[in-house]
Amino acid sequence: MRRGLVWGCWLATRIVGLLIILDRFPYPRRGEILGDPAIYEEWSRILAGGAFPEGDVRWQYPPLAAPVMLLPRWLGGTYTTTFALVALAADLLIMWLLTRSGRPLAGAWVWTAGLVLLGPMSYVRYDLVVTVAAVAALLMLARHRIFGVLAAVGALLKAWPVLLLAALPRSRRGAEAAAAFAVTCGAVLLVFGLAQGRAPWEFLDAQVSRGLECEAVAATPFMIARLSSWDGTIVYQYGSMELVGPGVERAAALLPPLTVAALLVVAVLAWRGAGRGWNVAWGCDVAFAAVLAAVATSRVLSPQYLLWLLGLAAVCLAHRGSRQRPAVPLILAATALSQFLYPLNWPDLMAAQPLETWILAVRNLLVLAATVIAVARLRTGPSNAGQDPAPSVTGAALPAR
């Protein structure tokens, strides 16, 4: 009965979301969210000709993004509509994985509600496809080689799933999963490299050159300063709205080292915790904390990044032994505020209106608070209470599979 209820809610909300994309259901500023599919369609024409979008600084994706951008073109129909249907299929797959027999339904409820809170933009953004790979990888964490392959697929779609490797145990199984990840990445990159030379790597140049996006956590002081006398502005570059003005470049330069430091803290806590006993729920908790730390210290925090956090939060709550429950409501609240800001009140945020600016500050404080809580929850190590059936060990010894 409860499983039927969550599926019924999922179906009803997804029908409404699809109707909004098809312009069959009213939604304020619907046109604002359709800009990215137009860019994807432009890229698909270039990719269909056998080349990557070299020279386009908006192309910031690893090589496996190419088939995803091409898929709506291959399937036919209006590109935006077909892309939304592909995204809906990805959403359905995530929901199926979260509701498989024996899993707590809390994760499925988080996922169902999360996409409603983020809005129909979810279906016209590439990130939903990447989230499928990440969710599937973590839910296959007990099958270490499969996890390694799926995490590699995610990293080859968009780089952030490489952080899922933090979930691995200190054991032979963990080493084998990392090897599967490396072999999969190496094989795919070799194929694309032989076919296209350096072209598949062009996305790295654009990523390195990006500035401080106006929605990033680190941008909050500058956005608040816009309400008074700060002599800065917002410009469109590298595919997003970035801040330009006094102090921005220095702040942006500090963020990559800060990301490294935050991830090192997560790695140390994960290493210590794994030494006291490892289980799948603990691995998912570590991955969630690692991705949160990366998002909170990133130069970019686009609304679609909340899809990553929602997916990983749902996976954590799909395990009875997760310690990350206190952080999840903060992510849901941040997700709702993200839709309020984009697309519903985007012009007012760009115009430095006080309400939207302070709501952005609250949204970013929620993300930061969730990050601190998620990392802090790793200090106590894995929980042995209410565990789902999964391999669990103490120390470094795990049976080989």
Image: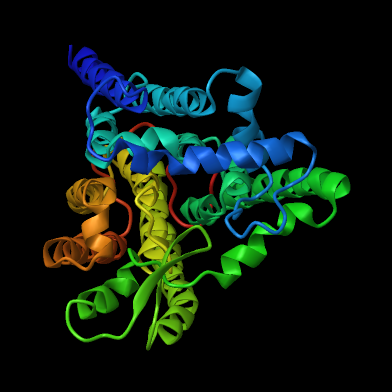
Q: How far across and down, in percent of the image, does residue 172 sit? A: 61, 50
Q: Residue at x 28, y 17 (%)?
A: 11
Judge by depth and name the residue closer to the eye, 252 or 365.
252
Q: Residue furthest left?
A: 355
Which quadrant of the figure has residue 115?
top left
Give the quadrant of the C terminus: top right
In the picture, measured across the screen, residue 344 lies left or right of residue 94, that is left
Residue 231 locus on image (x, y percent): 30, 86
The answer to whether residue 137 is visible is no
Q: Is residue 295 left or right of residue 113?
A: right
Figure quadrant of residue 107: top left
Residue 206 visible in the current orientation: yes
**Residue 371: % across, % down:** 29, 63
**Looking at the image, which residue is at 31% across and 21% down?**
19
- How far across and how far down the image is residue 212, in percent? 42, 72
Residue at image location 39% in from the left, 51% down from the top: 305
How many numbered discs, if any? 0
245 up-or-down from 235: above or below: below
Question: Quick check: 222 left or right of 86?
Answer: left
Say if 85 sits above or below 121 in the image: above
Tell me: residue 9, above or below residue 37. above
Q: Nearer the viewer, residue 335 or 292?
A: 335
Question: Looking at the image, which is closer to me, 102 or 190?
Answer: 190
Question: Going 40% across and 32% down the picture, which residue do you hit?
Answer: 123
| In the image: residue 336, left or right of residue 309 | left
Please state, as top left, top right, bottom left or bottom right, where the N terminus lies in the image.
top left
In the rendered view, how is the structure colored? rainbow
